[in-house]
Each structure stands twice: as structure tokens, then as C-alpha cells.
């Protein structure tokens, strides 16, 4: 059985993983840069690139040691070569190319979004074609996954990504970064007693818009804090109201997207990928929607929803199986839409 080494460094997580063809994650290590970026309230690209460089050797050695393996036993090296913060992408891609050159192994350039998209095939062996809701800090779209390298976009956000909306709302509530998990925890303690807009709900198609909701949350906080401090109870109720609005919108948009997808392909499942897929309340809501449509809902465990290298190694494995190898001259890309992938 073949083994692929995966490398991820496109945002603020440096990660290395070894994945075997039978969908076993042999070892993985991840270093998050949260502390380095925290003082700035968001990810600083230059700091991210330097932090990847500082961590990547150590993580690689740790993973090989944990798996008890030599590089000679690995069948291919897969690294994220985009999209993402270019400095970080270059660090991971160069590291991967160097390993490939040194050990004379094939190199596979993995699109970070395809890594997220194929995760449910690693965790749940979901068959093509499936419906995919891809929601992370930088991306927010609905697609049909027809096959490796073959994605059909149905709709997406007109402004902010869903994870970004969670992060911005959390920042306004003083909850820190990343905002998604903090909002989810606060919402669990609160009551959704504030009416917030549900952008694009009830309209045709399956696009999203979150910037109006973000503004409404800001105005709500201003209004409420005119008469009381931003206390724990208020934070919990605003978070609950925001999350309820988001879930209502996502349910409405996914229902439309799903109808569009079902008219085009015989779907096997609804998959949710990207960091926001870690949200349990959203998952429960989509589970009900999937049940109505008689489809299985596939959501990876939280640690594989947010950025990780196992998903990159797995996407590399799928590409290796199809003979989709890349040369060492492949260039890192800041932008790389899923529609522009190479396929068999
Ligand atoms: O996929 P990811 O790790 O990085 C990107 O490629 O963007 O996604 C990170 C995003 C952040 O915006 C974070 O707030 C969000 O995923 N997120 C969540 C949850 N966990 C992470 N959003 C909502 N609920 C969560 N439990
Ligand atoms: Zn991601």
C-alpha cells in the first residue's frame, strides 16, 4: 500500500502528515500560530511565512519519528501550492520539492480547497458525485464534486466568507480569534432573542452575502451597550442571534443549491468541508435537511475540518492513484480557483 507525505502551510497552520492508501492517517503534527498573530487581531502574512519556516523541519522530523519511517518508504510528497498567503505557500511548497528532489520521489501540487473537498473521502469514503458546501475563513461556496480535479461551482458568497463573518462578529464581541469556536460556545449559553437580517434568504439561486449581517450585529451591539455594559449574558444572546441567522440562511441557500445539483447529477451525499464545518449547531441543522433529501450527510471530525496536512496528503494520494504528478517547476499560487485544476 502506498504512503503519501502531506504538507500544509497556506494560512496560519504549519502541518505535516503521513497517510496510507487504506485511508489510515499514520502520523500527523500541526503547529498553530495563534499566539504570534493574536496581538494584531488577524493573520499577518509576513509573520505567518517566518513562523512556517521556523516550524516545518521540526514537524517533519516529529511525524517521521512517530510513524517510525524513513523518507525512502514514502511514495510521493504532496504540498499545498495554493491558494493562500503566498509567503507561507512558498515555504511549504519549497520544503516539499526539496524532499522530493533529495529522495527522488514524485511531487504532487495540491490545491488547498481540493484538500478540504476530498476530506470526506478520507474520513467517510464518500463516492462521487457529491454536493459540497465549502465554508472556511477565506472561502464560501457550493459545488458538485464530480471527481478528482473536477468541481462544478453552483454559487458562493458575494462578499465575506462565512468563517470571516464568524471571526468579525467575535471580534466585535471581544471574543478573540479564531471567532468561530468562540461564537459557538457563547451561543450555546444564550437565547437568540434579537432579530437580525437573513441576507438573500428566499431569493433564487444559492449565493450568500454576509456583510449586511455583520453591520447589523455592529449596530445591535452599539444599541444594546448604550444602556448596559457588554456583559456575558448580552454576548451570549448576540452570539446566539447571529448563529441562528447564519444557520437559517445556510439552510435556505443549501436547499436551493441542492435542488440545482440534483438536477445535474445523481448525488451520493451532502458533504460539508472547511473550518466552519466544525460548527455542531450548523451540522445538526444540515443533518435534518439531508435526511429530508434522503442523502447521507458527511462532515469530517473537527480536527480534519480546519486546516491540516492529512487532507493534503489524501488529496495527493488520490492524484497519485490517477497518475496526476507534477514537475518541480510547478509554481506556488496565491489564487487558484477549483475550476482550474488538472484532472485525469
Ligand atoms: O479551513 P480553515 O481552518 O482555514 C481556512 O482555510 O480559512 O477555517 C478557519 C475558519 C475560521 O474563520 C474559523 O472561525 C472557522 O473556520 N471556524 C468555525 C468553527 N471552527 C472554526 N466557525 C464556526 N464554528 C466553529 N466551531
Ligand atoms: Zn482551509
Image: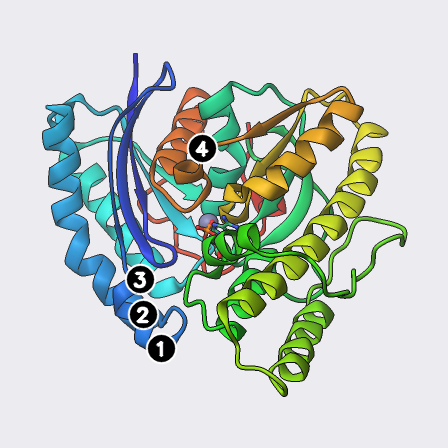
Give the position of the N terminus as an image quadrant. top left
Task: Please state if 315 lies on the left or on the right of 248 as rendered.
Answer: left
Q: Residue at horizontal 38%, vertical 58%? A: 11
Is disc 4 surrounded by few (<14), some (14 to 19) or many (20+) residues within 10 Å? some
Is disc 1 surrounded by few (<14), some (14 to 19) or many (20+) residues within 10 Å? few
Q: Which mark is residue 40?
A: 1
- Dot 4: what SS? loop
* Residue, disc 3: 34
Residue 200: quarter of image: bottom right
Front-most of 241 and 103?
Answer: 241
Q: Position of residue 139 (x, y in %)?
A: 57, 54
The numbered mark, 4 or 1, whose residue comes first in the sequence reads: 1
* Residue, disc 2: 37
The numbered mark, 1 or 3, whose residue comes first in the sequence reads: 3
Q: Is residue 51 above or below residue 271?
A: below
Q: Is residue 50 above or below residue 102?
A: below
Q: Is residue 144 visible?
A: no
Task: Please state if 258 lies on the left or on the right of 325 as rendered.
Answer: right
- Dot 2: what SS? helix
The numbered mark, 4 or 2, whose residue comes first in the sequence reads: 2
* Residue, disc 4: 301
- Dot 1: what SS? helix
Q: Residue at horizontal 41%, vertical 65%? A: 177
Amino acid at each position: 500500500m502506498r504512503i503519501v507525505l502531506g504538507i500544509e502551510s497556506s494560512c496560519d497552520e504549519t502541518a505535516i502528515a503521513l497517510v496510507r492508501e487504506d485511508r489510515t492517517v499514520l502520523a500527523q503534527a500541526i503547529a498553530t500560530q495563534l499566539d504570534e498573530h493574536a496581538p494584531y487581531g488577524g493573520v499577518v502574512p509576513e509573520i505567518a511565512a517566518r513562523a512556517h519556516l521556523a516550524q516545518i523541519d521540526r514537524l517533519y522530523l516529529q511525524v517521521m519519528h512517530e510513524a517510525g519511517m524513513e523518507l525512502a518508504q514514502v511514495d510521493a510528497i504532496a504540498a499545498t501550492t495554493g491558494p493562500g498567503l503566498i509567503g507561507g505557500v512558498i515555504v511549504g511548497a519549497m520544503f516539499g520539492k526539496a524532499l522530493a528532489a533529495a529522495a527522488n520521489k514524485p511531487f504532487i501540487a495540491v490545491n488547498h480547497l481540493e484538500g478540504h473537498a476530498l476530506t470526506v473521502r478520507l474520513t467517510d469514503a464518500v463516492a462521487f458525485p457529491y454536493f459540497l458546501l465549502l465554508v472556511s475563513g477565506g472561502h464560501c461556496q457550493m459545488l458538485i464534486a464530480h471527481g478528482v480535479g473536477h468541481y462544478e461551482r453552483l454559487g458562493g458568497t458575494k462578499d465575506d466568507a462565512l468563517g470571516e463573518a464568524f471571526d468579525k462578529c467575535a471580534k466585535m464581541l471581544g471574543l478573540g480569534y479564531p471567532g468561530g469556536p468562540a461564537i459557538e460556545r457563547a451561543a450555546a449559553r444564550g437565547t437568540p432573542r434579537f432579530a437580525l437580517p437573513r441576507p438573500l434568504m428566499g431569493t433564487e439561486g444559492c449565493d450568500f452575502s454576509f456583510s449586511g449581517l455583520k453591520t447589523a450585529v455592529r449596530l445591535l451591539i452599539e444599541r444594546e451597550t448604550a444602556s448596559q455594559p457588554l456583559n456575558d449574558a448580552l454576548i451570549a444572546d448576540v452570539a446566539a442571534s447571529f448563529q441562528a441567522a447564519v444557520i437559517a440562511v445556510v439552510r435556505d441557500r443549501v436547499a436551493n443549491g441542492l435542488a440545482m445539483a440534483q438536477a445535474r447529477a445523481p448525488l451520493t451525499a451532502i458533504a460539508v468541508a472547511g473550518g466552519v464545518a466544525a460548527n455542531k449547531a450548523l451540522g445538526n441543522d444540515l443533518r435534518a435537511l439531508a435526511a429530508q433529501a434522503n442523502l447521507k450527510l458527511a462532515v469530517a471530525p473537527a480536527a480534519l475540518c480546519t486546516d491540516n496536512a492529512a487532507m493534503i496528503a489524501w488529496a495527493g494520494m488520490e492524484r497519485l492513484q490517477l497518475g496526476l504528478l507534477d514537475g518541480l517547476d510547478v509554481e506556488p499560487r496565491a489564487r487558484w480557483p477549483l475550476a482550474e485544476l488538472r484532472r485525469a
